[in-house]
Image (spheres, rainbow, N blue to C red):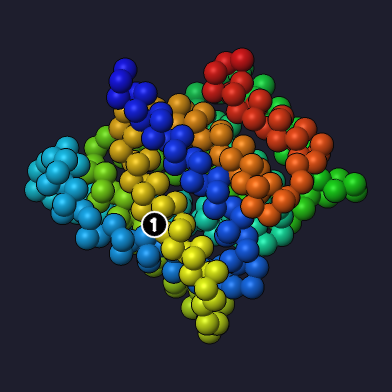
Amino acid sequence: MKQRWLADGALLFVVAIWGATFVMVKEAVSAFPVFAFLFIRFTIAALSLLPLIPYLERSFPSFAPSRPGAGRRALLAGMVLGVALTAGYAFQTFGLRYTTPAKAGFITGLSVVIVPVLSALLLRRPPELPVWVGGIMATVGLAVLSLNRDLSPQRGDVLVFFCAVAFALHILITGLFARGHPPLRLTLGQLVMVAVLSGGAGRLWEGPWPPVAPHVWWAAGFTGVLASTLAFTVQTVAQRHTSPSHTALIFSMEPVFAALFSYLLIGEPITPRVMLGGGFIIAGMIVAERGG
């Protein structure tokens, strides 16, 4: 039970960090290529984790590979996770160009509802009633946040919705891999894969990258070290002591932190529409996970 509480507290800390990143990422990519930013961010993340692995595995033997070849298998498993992670961050970062940090945070939070749906589909079991009710509530909230007066969806919000699907898949697969692989190597594989895929996509589709401005370096460094290396290591370790659905419920606090930091850092107003739509989404998350 103590390990469960420690895991929950660690995951909540991770969520607070992620909520703080929406504003700085939006400002960073407003005039800088998205894949170039992701390449810099996750290269910093991988390089900051790499020299720590030997020390941490010596200090915490449970983090180290327990048998020959386990480290290599963890890196490969992490690369599988990295594909879903790349998709999630690409959709989210492109979406932030066209929507507000608070709205992006709430829509990203839909992954909490999507996790049990994907889990039920992959296990070939229909979702239970609370999942359906929560999904309907979250969909209403998404419509309130995202639809224009002519009922057409806003481009940025659609992109962030696909981000939520990718993150839900990442949470689900992490739950499958976390208990069977050394966590630091699993995290390193993810970070390296996102950097490689982002760098390749950037070179293919973004052309020559411009000089990196100081605020872009700051955003990439903060998100690389704290929101990537630290956060994904903590998530991977914590999910060894809790379930994917419980992790998703804790992650429902991310949009709250995103709206709070958006208000505090750039003065983004929390309008009645944002409060109503966001309220439906958060309520849907809780109903889906806790059964009402």
Q: Mark 1 points at which residue?
A: 225
Q: Toward the viewer: 205 or 42?
A: 42
Q: Which residue lies furthest to the bottom in this view?
A: 208
Say if residue 197 shows up in the picture: no
- Indicate the secondary structure of the residue bearing disc 1: helix
- Tell me the amino acid under the disc marked 1: Val
Residue shown at 69% from the left, 46% from the top = 263
Task: From the viewer's perspective, tell me whether residue 221 is left or right of residue 117.
Answer: left
Instruction: From the top left corner, tell me how far across and down residue 207 is, in percent.
Output: 55, 82
Say if residue 261 shows up in the picture: yes
Q: Toward the viewer: 67 or 126?
A: 67
Q: Toward the viewer: 47 or 280?
A: 47
Instruction: From the top left corner, tell me how far across and down residue 16 is, in percent.
Output: 51, 41
Residue shown at 38% from the left, 40% from the top = 235
Residue shown at 15% from the left, 54% from the top = 54
Task: From the viewer's perspective, tell me whether residue 230 is left or right of residue 252.
Answer: left
Residue density around tag 1, few if under 14, some if 14–19, many if 20 or more, within 10 Å? many
Q: Which residue lies furthest to the right in this view?
A: 150
Task: From the viewer's perspective, tell me whether residue 256 is left or right of residue 240.
Answer: right
Q: Quadrant of residue 283?
A: top right
Instruction: From the top left corner, tell me how far across and down residue 11 is, in percent.
Output: 42, 35
Instruction: From the top left corner, tell me how far across and down residue 244 is, in percent.
Output: 42, 31
Q: In which quarter of the image is residue 94?
A: bottom right
Q: Quadrant of the C terminus?
A: top right
Q: Quadrant of the N terminus?
A: top left
Q: Toward the viewer: 51 or 177?
A: 51
Relative to 140, residue 145 above or below:
below
Residue shown at 49% from the left, 31% from the top = 250
How many dots with numbers?
1
Relative to 279, residue 67 above or below:
below
Q: Which residue lies furthest to the top in this view?
A: 292
